[in-house]
Image (tube, coloured by chain):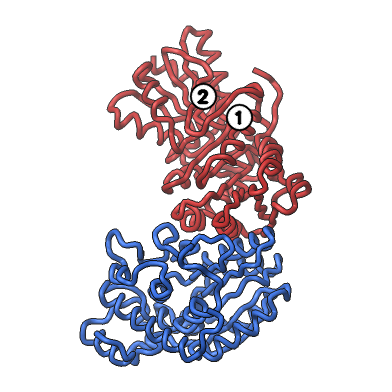
Amino acid sequence: MDTKKIATRDAFGEEIIAQGLANPNIYVIDADIGKSCKTTNFMKQLPEQHLNVGIAEQSAVAVAAGLATTGKIPFVVTYAVFGSLRACEVMRQEACYPNLNVKIACSHGGVTPANDGASHQAIEDMGVYRTIPNMTVIMPADYYSAKKLVAEVANTYGPTYIRFTRDAIPVIYDEDTEFEIGKAKMIQDGKDVAIIANGDTVRLAIEAAKVLADEGISTRVLDMHTIKPLDEEAVTAAVNDIGKIITVEDHNILNGLGSAVCEVTAELGKGIVKRVGIQDQFGESAPYERLLAKNGITVEDIVNHAKSMQ
Amino acid sequence: MKNTDVSELKKIANELRQSVIKMVYQAQSGHPGGSLSAAEIVTALYFREMNIDPQNPKWEDRDRFVLSKGHACPIQYAALAKRGYFDESELSTLRKEGSILQGHPDMKKTPGIDISTGSLGLGFPSATGMAIAAKRDGKDYRVFVVLGDGECQEGIVWEGAQVANKYQLDNLVIFVDNNNLQIDGTCDEVMPNIDLGKKFAAFGFEVYEINGNDMEQVVDVLDRIAEKRDSGKPKCIFADTVKGQGVSYMENQCDWHGKAPNTELYEQAMRELGGTL
């Protein structure tokens, strides 16, 4: 694994310019925090495709819906907690219900805005959007996959929520790896346990798999960047091939990746799942790694779960 | 349609009122009060002012109409049917399973609906997005919006007003259907709107105050606004109206916000409107 670290919000800021240059219908709608969400260069290079509606996330989504009725592909850009919860009903009524091509692209996913405290840590966002018909919900695991998935989102019709990290996270993939919305990426195959992770926790899954390998436990690692539509085939294969699954996410264990995986396994009537994620509790101002540790989201925890499943 | 005269428009408004009453009676559900208060506004837009093509509802250069107070859709459905967007026989299917006429406007199901509405407050800021697109694309279509006065209690209305001001949306025309009634009582009782016209003026709109149930005034204000097409400012027509206008027992009664008449009252309403049963 490459050891360099880049925040996925930077990947968004770069890729959205490439998309905007390629397609004049791509718009960015900022809600005052473009600097932080990395859209400043888009604004400078493509001012005719840029709007800033101020600190008003609800109207940002409504404006996007209006633009989308005319064929634009607007990306509403803000922090995850506001782009999901504050803007949720507008997204539901004006974009999801009429199935308009509105995208919400958010920095500060999960507990990555660590020292900002609980008000800025989005732990419910993916779950909220997963519940609304027509939505696609994505969190990329690193810089390169973020760029590829932003391109996919820009070129795939439908209302979509995609969230990024505030902080730098390790680069996992090489530049040429391809990603498809709704298709899990198998990082390595194994036969004793499957770890299904997304976003900034994929790196933990990879590290845990290395530790487990040293202890003779063979691990399949899946990057489930899209939690809706979920790659049910990949989950079903993990159940049938291995039967022991650990889900890992920087999100509440309720209604995120873990829940989505459990819905598949429950209907299959087989397989056991351990959900690693935010333990249905609010965070606080603290270092990012400490916030993860307080919720049992560590390499050590994942390794212990894997061992206890054997 | 620009030459449709006022007497003809008045006649059409009355016909649309009859359609509203009939549709809500047949559905035994729906919102007559706020549909009737907006009849002159909707008639003047669909039968005189707007540049639209019922044979090509998605025509990209068409004027847009956004019913932000989406519950008043019976009046819009009546107008769309009469303009030929769909067969008038569809009106009897309002709110029924499988109908193209949903309880609130649905752009996917009904030809001529430019965006789905129903959740109060959301149509207007969405309309600003359409108006921005026109400016960015160099198109000269306009976007017309009908807001309820009660609806203006929603905070997002003022977010939309900020956007209209910042982006100088002189191609945006909003009507405030100021009937001073909402579900739980008068607006003054439930949540005073203070002076809505002044609020919109403070948000950078050119504000025109009219009697919104007087067809001469509606037509006149639209003519005046058309002349100020490039003023750089969004337009607000602050239209005093009577909720339930045209049906005596519905007028100024908030109970008729969302209620269907029984057979006796239906027949009375149709008699008052000069319609046939």
* Image height of B59 relative to B215, above or below: above
Residue marked by disc 2: A185
Which residue is pictured at 35% across the width and 62% down the height?
Answer: B100
Q: CA distance from mark 2 to mark 1?
A: 10 Å
Residue marked by disc 1: A145
Q: Which chain is red?
A: A
Task: Count neighbours of disc 2 (C-alpha within 10 A) and say few if under 14, some if 14 to 19, many if 20 or more.
Answer: many
Residue A291 in picture, x, y percent from top left: 58, 35
Residue B263 in sight from this viewpoint: yes
* Image height of A280 relative to B142, above or below: above
* Image height of A293 relative to B277, above or below: above
Please identify the quarter of the rendering in which residue A97 is found: bottom left
Q: Amino acid at mark 2?
A: Lys
| Extreme residue toward the left, this view | B263
Q: Colour of chain B?
A: blue
Which residue is pictured at 55% across the width and 22% down the height?
Answer: A299
Please identify the quarter of the rendering in which residue B96 is found: bottom left
User: The numbered mark 2 sits on a residue in which chain?
Assistant: A
Which residue is pictured at 55% across the width and 67% down the height?
Answer: B64
Q: Amino acid at mark 1?
A: Ser
